[in-house]
């Protein structure tokens, strides 16, 4: 019996962002590649974070090449399903819409995997509303969390929606990272994300200022690529708040260097209010390393961080609320360990890469059968 044929049009690194990382997981998945006859086309037009959502002639050229590859693939093979990593809004949406039109022109069944949001807000524009109606017509959709359905509810019936939370490789940490965590002094807070305003970097910095004023003993590490926050601006804030000896920025780190920060941390903080935030992979990494998490109610984060069980959810852009929860954890090593271990257990149950591959393979098989 022949395998179902699926054309995957998705992102994979560079740049290193959530959708691209998940795209790489799919492309390299032994389960997916043995279950389906899979072909892959890279949808990325940016090679660097700073190029995302920006135009330019080089991007137009890359997009035309992608469109040509899609048309060539569809002419050469009859696919049972076309999978598209679909961008909800902005320039990326219009870029993906061009691919959608090609897929529909060839009469293919389509399933969208949405790693971001913004349809509900963006659809207030009449032209965008028309584009969404066209794109979502007769399409199936994979969402990362039930919390995200409302964003597309106007265009997609719930029976056409599948839910597949992200997962990450269940690699074994390089050492017994729990050793000494209870006695760690000073307490180590970790922010691991691109250095952007909307990820809450400055909110956390202000919370650190309040913690210092309250006499808390801690060190906070910011690890991530400089984006709309420059290193100069960040250092200026550090000096302004008098945090030069308590807060440190390390730039982007990968592999073993990143793992060292996760192993030595005691608390993970991501006070994001990023409008596209859906299901941050970095929170799954924090859970894998048994870190209690303090984050916000954005996208599907409340699926990951269970209030008072694996961490705390605080109000967005509220440095005082963030400071209060961080202070509780700084002062209570036993609570840190309890919440962190509960988070690790939740990760192992729900958010490993194996779980992700099994779930998405079942979704794709169901979508093929539904036709």
Image: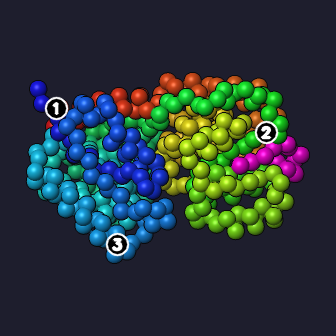
Q: Determine which residue is flagged by label 2.
A: 187
Binning the other alpha carbons within 10 Å of mark 3 as few (below 14), some (14 to 19) or many (20 upward) gives few
Q: Nearer the viewer, residue 176 or 272?
A: 176
What residue is rendered at 61% in x and 44% in y?
258
Element at badge 3? helix
Mark before the other along the chain sequence, 2 or 1: 1
Asked if the magenta segment contains residue 213, the reply would be yes
Residue 33 drawn above or below residue 225: above
Rendering coords of residue 235 (x, y %): 74, 64
Q: Which image quarter is the N terminus in?
A: top left
Task: Please say if the residues under marks 2 and 3 sit with CB atoms less than 8 Å apart.
Answer: no
Q: Is residue 321 above or below residue 135?
A: above
Q: CA distance from mark 1 to mark 3?
A: 37 Å
Quadrant of the frame with the C terminus: top left
> Can you give x and y, in whole percent of width and height, for residue 173 in the image?
59, 31
Q: Who's the residue at 66% across and 36% down the image?
A: 263
Mark 1 packing: few (<14 Cα in 10 Å), some, or many (20+)?
few
The boundaries of the magenta stretch are: 211-221
Q: Earlier in the sequence, mark 1 or mark 3?
A: 1
Graded by Cα atoms within 10 Å as few (under 14), some (14 to 19) or many (20 or more), the crowding at tag 2 reads many
Q: In whole angstroms, how far apart are the C-alphas of marks 2 and 1?
A: 53 Å
Query: In the rendered image, is residue 208 in sight?
Result: yes
Residue located beneath label 3 in the image? 58
Mark closer to the observer (2, 3): 3
User: Would residue 297 be counted in the magenta stretch?
Assistant: no
Q: Quadrant of residue 122?
A: bottom left
Q: Position of residue 289 (x, y in %)?
A: 61, 32
Q: Circle 1 is placed at which residue position?
A: 3
Q: Residue 47 at what x, y percent from top left?
A: 42, 61
């Amino acid at each position: 019996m022949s395998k179902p044929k699926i054309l995957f049009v998705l992102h994979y690194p560079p740049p290193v962002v959530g959708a691209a990382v998940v795209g790489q997981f799919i492309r390299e998945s032994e389960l997916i590649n043995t279950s389906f006859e899979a072909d892959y086309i890279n949808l990325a037009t940016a090679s660097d974070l700073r190029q995302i959502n920006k135009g330019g002639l080089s991007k137009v050229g890359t997009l035309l090449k992608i469109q040509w590859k899609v048309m060539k693939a569809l002419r050469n093979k009859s696919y049972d399903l076309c999978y598209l990593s679909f961008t909800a809004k902005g320039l990326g949406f219009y870029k993906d819409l061009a691919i959608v039109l090609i897929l529909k022109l060839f009469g293919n069944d389509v399933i969208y995997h949405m790693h971001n949001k913004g349809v509900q807000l963006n659809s207030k524009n009449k032209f965008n509303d028309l584009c969404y109606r066209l794109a979502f017509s007769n399409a199936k959709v994979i969402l990362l969390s039930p919390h995200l359905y409302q964003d597309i509810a106007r265009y997609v019936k719930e029976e056409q929606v599948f839910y597949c939370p992200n997962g990450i490789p269940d690699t074994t940490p390089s050492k017994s990272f729990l050793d000494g965590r209870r006695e760690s002094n000073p307490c180590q807070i970790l922010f691991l994300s691109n250095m952007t305003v909307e990820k809450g970097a400055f909110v956390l910095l202000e919370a650190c200022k309040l913690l210092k004023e309250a006499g808390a003993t801690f060190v906070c590490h910011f690890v991530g690529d400089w984006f709309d926050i420059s290193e100069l601006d960040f250092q200026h804030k550090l000096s302004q708040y008098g945090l030069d000896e308590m807060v440190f920025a390390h730039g982007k780190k990968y592999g073993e260097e990143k793992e060292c920060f996760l192993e030595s941390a005691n608390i993970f903080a991501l006070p994001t209010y990023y409008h596209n935030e859906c299901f941050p992979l970095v929170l799954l990494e924090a859970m894998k390393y048994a870190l209690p998490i303090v984050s916000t109610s954005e996208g599907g984060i409340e699926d990951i961080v269970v209030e008072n069980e694996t961490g705390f959810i605080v109000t967005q852009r509220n440095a005082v609320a963030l400071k209060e929860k961080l202070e509780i954890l700084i002062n209570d090593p036993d609570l840190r360990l309890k919440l962190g271990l509960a988070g690790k257990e939740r990760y192992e149950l729900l958010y490993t890469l194996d779980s992700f591959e099994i779930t998405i393979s079942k979704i794709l098989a169901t979508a093929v059968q539904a036709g």
